[in-house]
Image (cartoon, rainbow, N blue to C red):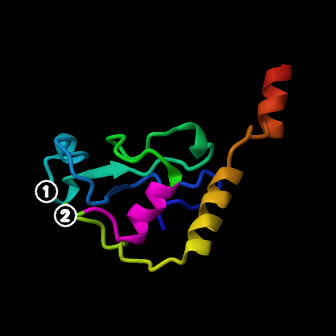
Amino acid sequence: MCHRGPNFADDQFHALGVMGDDPGRFKVTGVEADRNAFKTPTIRNVTLTAPYMHDGSLSTLREVIDFYDAGGGPMLPKSSLLRRLHLTEKEKADLVAFLESLTGEVEKTSVELRAAAE
């Protein structure tokens, strides 16, 4: 899973099959397996970051969910994590609601509060 943990991101690079001219991580590494791979962003406050994907090709969260439901885009190479999901309309609506619930302020930790007080 790509969006996991407290930051809802795995800090790794994945190719999603998104079409475009940007070669992604390949531009830095020169490794063919990194072609079209981009770092997984956090989905915290995702409602505030439209348009979506590295190239801004998807305008709404519903479009993103439809993209993943279809197994990603057509470009290869593509992450082996991607596959058709066959989500129902209710599941898609529930996913949008979940993503919307991740919008808000992140509470400061006690360490951050102590450092600010010093």
Q: What secondary structure is found at the residue carrying circle 1?
A: helix
Question: What is the span of residues highlighted in magenta in the rendered image?
Answer: 62-73
Q: Residue at x 31, y 73 (%)?
A: 80
Residue 110 x, y percent position in the rendering: 84, 38
Residue 27 x, y percent position in the rendering: 18, 41
Kind of residue sitting beneath label 2: Pro
Q: Residue at x 52, y 52 (%)?
A: 61
Q: Nearer the viewer, mark 1 or mark 2?
A: 2
- Which residue bears the numbered disc 1? 32
Q: Which corner quadrant holds the C terminus?
A: top right
Observer-nearest residue: 90 or 21? 90
Relative height, residue 46 to residue 34 (above, below): above
Q: Residue at x 58, y 55 (%)?
A: 8
Q: Magenta segment: does it hold 65?
A: yes
- Which residue bears the numbered disc 2? 77
Residue 37 x, y percent position in the rendering: 28, 53
Q: Is residue 79 left or right of residue 105?
A: left
Q: Is residue 3 left or right of residue 72?
A: right
Q: What secondary structure is found at the residue carrying circle 2?
A: loop
Relative height, residue 114 to residue 71 (above, below): above
Magenta region, mostly helix, strand or loop?
A: helix
Calculate the distance from the C-alpha at mark 1 to the C-alpha at mark 2: 9 Å
Observer-nearest residue: 86 or 18? 86
Observer-nearest residue: 87 or 78? 87
